[in-house]
Amino acid sequence: MNSKMKDSKSYSGIQLYSLVVLRLFIGWHLLYEGIAKLINPGWSSVGFLRESKWIMSGFANWVTSNSGILNVVDFLNTWGLIAIGTGLILGLFSRVASIFGTILLLMYYLNNPPLIGLEYSLPSEGNYLVINKTLIEAVALFALSVFPTSHIVGFDLFVNRLRQKK
Amino acid sequence: MKNKNKQEQNTKPKTGQVQNTNLNRRTLLKAMAGIPVLGLLAYGASEKKAYNKNQSARLIKELGLDDLQAPQKIQSRAGEGDLIRIGFIGFGNRANQLARGLGFMNKATAQSQKENGRLQHWMEQEYLNVEIVGICDVFDLHAENGLDIAKNGFRVNGQTGTDVPVKRYRTYQEMLADDSIDAVVVATPDHHHARITADGVRAGKHVYCEKSIALSEEELNEVYNAVKNSDRVFQLGHQITQNTVFQQAKEIIRKDILGKITLVETTTNRNSASGAWIRHLDNNGNAKPGSLDTIDWVQWLGDRPKMPFTVDRFYNWTKFFDYDHGMLGQLFSHEYDAVNQLLRIGIPHSAVSSGGIYFWKDNREIPDLLQSVFEYPDKELTLMYSASLASSRQRGRVFMGHDASMELGSSLKITADYDSTKYKQQIEEGLIDTNGPMLSVSPGSGIDAITSPTEKYYASRGLTDTYVNGRPVDVTHLHLKEWIDVIRHGGQVSDDIEKAYEEGITILMAHKSYVEKRRVEWDPVGRKIV
């Protein structure tokens, strides 16, 4: 296993740093999304969820019609974004962060996919058909989970060493 | 340097030295490269927050609204004191909602609310320490429903049912004569309101009466005098003004944010059979229950002209002038109340109405399109009411001032006027953008100055009302609570008899104008419509 892992992580310098930059940028984006929600006391996912279309609309309805559940969703969303973003930037538990980040981004995408026939009251800032930036970010994050860099540029270097000592 | 890096990545793991040797400084620093990035983001985020706050605070400060924070939760002693024993006169659809506002819910409804997770909101409603001890309805089915809710219903304090006896009264006079009743809630069709309210206060009962108060000047004068000569607490059933944003709206008016207000536009917009008061069919299209065997029709008609019983007339009474004033009584009454509570405009100098029956071609007498204009020359203000039962396009309720306009619904939005004198400088500086609202207030989340385009967008769509900070509040409950509070501890209700009188006259003027097809005026000396 060790040798297989090592092989997959043998990047050239340019490969390594483009992956690291991608990781830092996505981390930056998600972390600031979380912070912005945290420092805006009036923020709630209710506006986003009310717009929900397609397969997640039932779930979104259930969440918005119940203030207890909505509070939980808001809390998890805000702190999930902060944890994932921090993990990506620091390179700490980066693989877990990438996978959870991918799932979260897919949830956003599935609530508002730009499919033919789905109309949203919020205008998008570009033109999308099926694929939008959220989906691209999700796929990019998934790619990062299979091309990890945090054991070289990141705290996972120490995490790995601690693990190996045990 | 590049090559060196390359070497490190390519060679070190291969030789397996990373695990075994101590980390050199370079590897260590690289591992912690995320820290300065995190620091940069933290700095950026705090700068941005400070900037947004500055813009928002500056606008709020310049408007003189920095102390504008309505209390989120009104301290209340409504539930303290002796038990208040309440009788319901009329127990149809509206009475169910009123019972809920007082803390009583049908068991089956409570169960279904529990299943969809809505019961909890209601359970958070304040316990008012009242009992429903009497029900009076001319229809057996409605009376039974009322008795069931009072006797076996689910209560806001978590209990089910009561040991306190609950009695059905055949006539409202019987109920009023019973000393075991302290207060009555009147939720009958409108043609009984004035008489029951007047008799109620004369019999020593506190009265909560649904709008509208009276269908003629004689009735209105009678109920006005009866309440005036009594020490009982009377409250007219309106609830818009109990919305928390109304407190802020009052403050905004008081602080003259809008400048001189010369036009208030109110609208009601409906486009369904039920909204047009066609309500005699159930969901499957069958006639709702009720016949002369189960309905005391003579008592239902009261002092109105004798008419044969039909299910149509019994359920759809709103369509006929004998029993109410259509949109003026049912819908404009709320609009007028909202405006009168904010601006205290009182009775208009004149009123003109026009309209007709253009869409619902049934046996109705009430118009389905109606426009009424009320002039207040002393206050230099026009109040407009525009109503349709054939289009549900939402047109809102707007107060138009020289410097800004205020749209007031479940949330509140203020938009500066492009040609404003007061805000000329801020508009030129770009602090105020006249293309979208500059201020919004949503229940529970206080006041926000809107300085970013996203916020503007959300506010313009009314998406800023939040369900998180403020739990959904039943405004009917607040209105009933106020009544109970004043009964127990004294004070002033929002919709006392003076405001009810002003509203009654205003509606009667518009109605008279529609029926007589002429402009009518108020004679303040003779206190009559001419």
Image (cartoon, coloured by chain):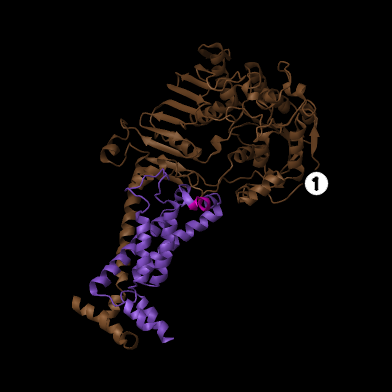
Chain colours: A purple, B brown
Q: x, y (%) of residue B110? A: 67, 47
Extent of the magenta region:
A55-60
Residue shown at 30%/79% (left/top)? B28
Q: Please identify the residue farthest to the front as the structure is shown.
A: A116
- x, y (%) of residue A166? 44, 86
> Which residue is located at x 64 percent, y 19 percent?
B221
Residue B523 is at least partly visible in this image: no
Q: Which residue is mark 1?
A: B163
Circle count: 1
Q: Is residue A101 above or below residue B314?
A: below
Q: From what the image shows, is residue A121 above or below residue B306?
A: below
Q: Chain of mark 1?
A: B
Tell me if residue B361 is in the magenta stretch.
Answer: no
Front-most of B182 and A60? A60
Where on the picture, by quarter, is residue A12?
bottom left
Q: Judge left or right: residue B51 versus residue A68.
A: left
Which element is circle 1 on?
Answer: loop
Left or right of B422: which side holds B186? right
The residue at the point 39 percent across, 29 percent down is B401
Q: Quadrant of residue B323?
A: top right
Looking at the picture, which amino acid does disc 1 mark? Asp
Q: Position of residue B445 (x, y in %)?
A: 47, 47
Q: Quadrant of the C terminus of chain B?
A: top right
* Quadrant housing the N terminus of chain B: bottom left
Q: Nearer the viewer, residue B516 or A127?
A: A127
What kind of secondary structure does the magenta stretch mostly adopt?
A: helix
